[in-house]
Structures are given as structure tokens and as C-alpha cells.
Image: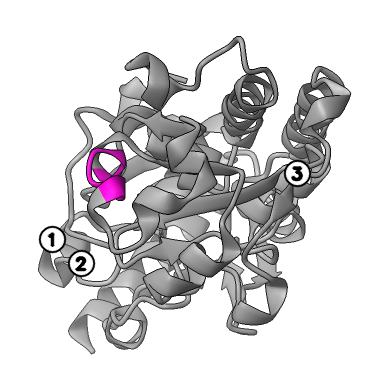
Amino acid sequence: MRRAGWLGWRRAWLLAAALLLGWPARAEVRLTDDQGVQVRLAQPPQRIVSLLPSLSEAVCELGRCERLVGVDRYTNWPPALAGVPRVGGGLDPNVEAIVALRPDVVLLATSSRAIERLRALGLTVVALEPRTHQDVQRVLLTLGTLLDVPDAARVWRAIDAAVSAAAQSLPPAVRGLRVYVEVSPGPYAAGEASFIGQTLQRLGARNVVPATLGPFPKLNPEFVVRADPDVILVSSRAAEALAQRPGWARLRAVRQGRVCAFDAAQSDVLVRPGPRMAEAARLMADCLARAADPARPTAAAAGGRP
């Protein structure tokens, strides 16, 4: 309660100072987050803690990178954030460290277990969960409202145009290739309903994981054996052991060397629904182009990057 009182006093003092000193007034911020919670701020936040890498990247892409005073342990782009304090993970943040940073707002995923505790301490929380292309567009616009960036829509237009350009660059042989995308061990896959699946669809490929299983389902490895995809996209670390998984050595993608192995930095690009989705589309397009051309080995077959 004392924390909540301090925040209220601080905001009241800033408002009074603005009126007395003639500082330019800033419009009140009003928005609704992905939990349906209505958020109101007297002005755009100047001190922001982000607990989701894609949200950190979006804040920077919108030109407000300098306002990030704390980020989660997985945020590693852009380089300008290298010196920003880390406050734990999105699911298990260091609440005390966050409070000590005196943020005006905390950005996090709707799945974070810290939401209610942070709100109970008087912090303003905005919960956002981008999982599809439509979600990414909506989140960018929501952040634009929060950060007072009138042209936030330009970021989505650039992403959308780049995905279309990547699709147009592909040969007809790519259309209809059956693809399996693994986002993490488990295995967890990117299904048709995910932003990755939607990008694949726009590139003309077919995802072997149907939308009915959800955006990022955990699969029985036997599911992939039965699906027998033409192409596999996976992290370079996981690619090393694919053939050791029961039955996976028989997969046509493994036998024919159509496995695109992505290093850690590339994997980050692929699995983050934010400003770098355009770069992700180019990575995926290059993989599919290699798979469609027998004369061009994929990364796994060539022993290099896709």
C-alpha cells in the first residue's frame, strides 16, 4: 500500500509541476490490454520495464528504446539494450528488482505469473500476447497508443510488405512443400495457427501441424514420423540429434538433407513475433528455396547457416 501511495503522490506532483511551470501538457493514455484490463496513465510512460523480448524489440522499433529501464533475461536485441538491467524471466521475474526501477509501466505476457503481484504493489501493468500476424499488428498499434507514436502502423506495413516480397522471390517449386517447424525441445512445434505458421502459408508452404492443435503444441514425436515432412526447420543444436530420435532417420527431410538448422541468433529471429518478422520470413524463404532446388543443399547438408 505504501508503494501504491508513493506512485500516486509522484504522478500528482508531476501533474502539479507541469501546471505551475507551464510544461507542455501530454495527452492522457487510455488503452485496453489483452486481459481486457483498462489502463489509464496521466501521460505516456517514461520508465518502462519489458518482460517479453518481442515487446522490448517493438518498443525500440517504435523509437522509444531509451525509455526501457529493465528487460527480461532473454532480451538480446537490439544491441542498444545490452546495458539495460535484467530482471529475471517473463514467467519468473524478480519483482523486487522491478519495483526498485520505479517503472511507469511494466509490459509482459498474459501468461506471466507476476501480473497480480505487480498490480497489488501499485504498478501499472500492460499484458500483451502476440501469437498471430493479426496479434502483432494489434500489439504494435497498442504500444503506439501507449508510447504516443502516431505512425505506429508504419512498422506493421513494413513487416507485411517484406513478407510479401519474400514470398514473391520464391520459385513455383516451393508451393505445396510440407514443412515441420520446431521451436523448442519437447518437441514443441509452430502450428498453422501461429505467426510462424501464417508466414509459412504466405510463402506457399504447407504446415504439417494443423491449426486444430493450437499455435505452439507439444507433439508426440511419432506425430512427425507419421507426417513425414518434406522440409524441417529446427535449431542447429536440435538438428544434431534428429536422426537419433526413434523413427526420424527414415523421414524424407532427414534422408534427403532438407533440414534447415538455425543458430541461436537466427532462432531468436524466427520465434519472436515482432519487428524482425520480416527477417524471419527471409530466413524461411531461403530455406524453402534451397529445399526446392536439389542443386542447393540446405544448411544441415552443407554444414553451414541457412
Q: Secondary structure at mark 2?
A: loop
Spatial CA span between label 3 and label 2? 38 Å
Image location (x, y in percent) of residue 204 = 82, 40
**Amino acid under disc 3:** Ala
Q: Is residue 229 visible?
A: yes
Assess whether mark 1 and mark 2 are in contact (beta carbons under 8 angstroms).
yes
Image location (x, y in percent) of residue 199 = 71, 45
Mark 2 neighbour class, 10 Å CA radius: few under 14, some 14 to 19, many 20 or more = some
Assess whether mark 2 and mark 3 are in contact (beta carbons under 8 angstroms).
no
Q: Give the label on residue 97, or none.
A: 1
Q: Give the label on residue 205, or none.
A: 3
**Amino acid under disc 2:** Pro
- Give the residues in magenta: 238-243
Q: Is residue 25 left or right of residue 44?
A: right
Rendered residue at 67%/54% (across/down):
197
Rendered residue at 60%/76% (across/down):
214
